[in-house]
Amino acid sequence: MSDMDEMEDGSGIVKKFMFLNRKAPHGTVYALEGLEVVLITAAFDQDVSMVFTDDGVYQLMKGIDSKGIEVKDFSKTYRALDGYDIEKLYVDQASMDARGLTEDDLIVDVTVLAVDEMANLMAEQDVVISF
Amino acid sequence: MPMVNIAGKEVEVDEEGYLVDLSQWNEDIAKYMAVEEKVDLTESHWEVVNFLREYYAEYQIAPAVRVLTKAIGKKLGPEKGNNKYLYELFPYGPAKQACKIAGLPKPTGCI
């Protein structure tokens, strides 16, 4: 609750965190748990970026209906990221192409990166965590 | 998990008293939770509680307090979107207490 206060008496170090999402949204708990970790990291005022690659791009698809498998549809939560000041969302071009997806198929605004651009972005990070 | 009887209905809550099944929520439950939290519900409290329910319906999460404050400021104006106003309504933490009354889970990132 006192995320702001803690930053004030703490050292206030801000690291660059990248969260790499590689798995389909349902079937494993990775996508949902990864999202929770991202929200918690943001509460500590860290520099957060999220990358969606491989089947991870499916996490951002519009029109997910998870009723049939009786799990919560958390795809709407990606839209709340903006309110948490998480604005750096990247998707991998090749993963999108391989699945026939374009930016219009996604629930949030993203930056599409080619593989070499993605590699540069990763090299700039202090921490990369993969889900 | 514990069951409590609220206005003649059995409802399941977690260890901290948060409602387990969001779809069971009604005004009686809100009033019960408010008594538990020692909050006297006024129009202003309901405004925040209803805001939280709308936020959850849209985003499927309970917002962290910082995010809640900002979002309330946007929707209801800066005189309400600040810590002082929200902590006066919910002294033990607006996100924590208001979420409980609204039947939402404890906010993510709320430690």
Image (tube, grey):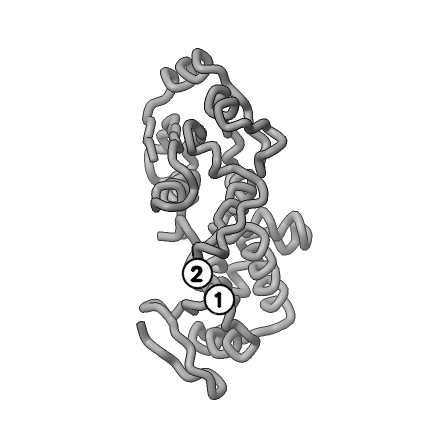
Q: Residues within 10 Å of mark 2 (few under 14, many from 20)?
A: many
- At a point 46% along the width and 74% down the height, the residue shown is B33
Q: Mark 1 Cα within 10 Å, few/some/many (few <14, many 20+)?
A: few
In this rendering, the answer to whether B58 lies above or below B34 is above
- Is B97 above or below relative to A65? below
Q: Chain of mark 1?
A: B
Whether residue A13 sits left or right of residue A72 in the image: it is left
2 vs 1, front mark: 1
Front residue of A21 and B44 = A21
Q: Which residue is mark 2?
A: B105
Q: Position of residue B22 (x, y in %)?
A: 48, 66
For label 1, the residue is B22
Q: Residue at x 58, y 41 (%)?
A: A62
Q: Is the same chain shared between marks 2 and 1?
A: yes
Seen at 41% across and 45% down, the residue is: A26
Task: Give the amino acid at mark 2.
Answer: Pro
The answer for which chain carries disc 2 is: B
Residue B80 spot, x, y in % from top left? 63, 55
The answer to whether residue B49 is visible is: yes
**Quarter of the view holding residue A52:** top left
User: Where residue B48 sits in the image (x, y, percent)?
Assistant: 59, 62
- A67 or B14: nearer the viewer: A67
- Quadrant of image for the C terminus of chain A: top left
Q: Is residue A77 above or below residue B92?
A: above
Given residues A25 and A41, the one toward you in this image is A25
Disc 1 residue type (three-letter): Leu
Location of residue A120 by image quarter: top left
Q: Is A130 left, or right, of B39 in this rendering? A: left
Which SS class for mark 1? helix
What residue lies at 51% left-to-right and 60% top-to-bottom?
B87
Disc 2, disc 1: CB below 8 Å?
yes
Q: Could you say which is closer to the camera, residue B31 or residue B2?
A: B2
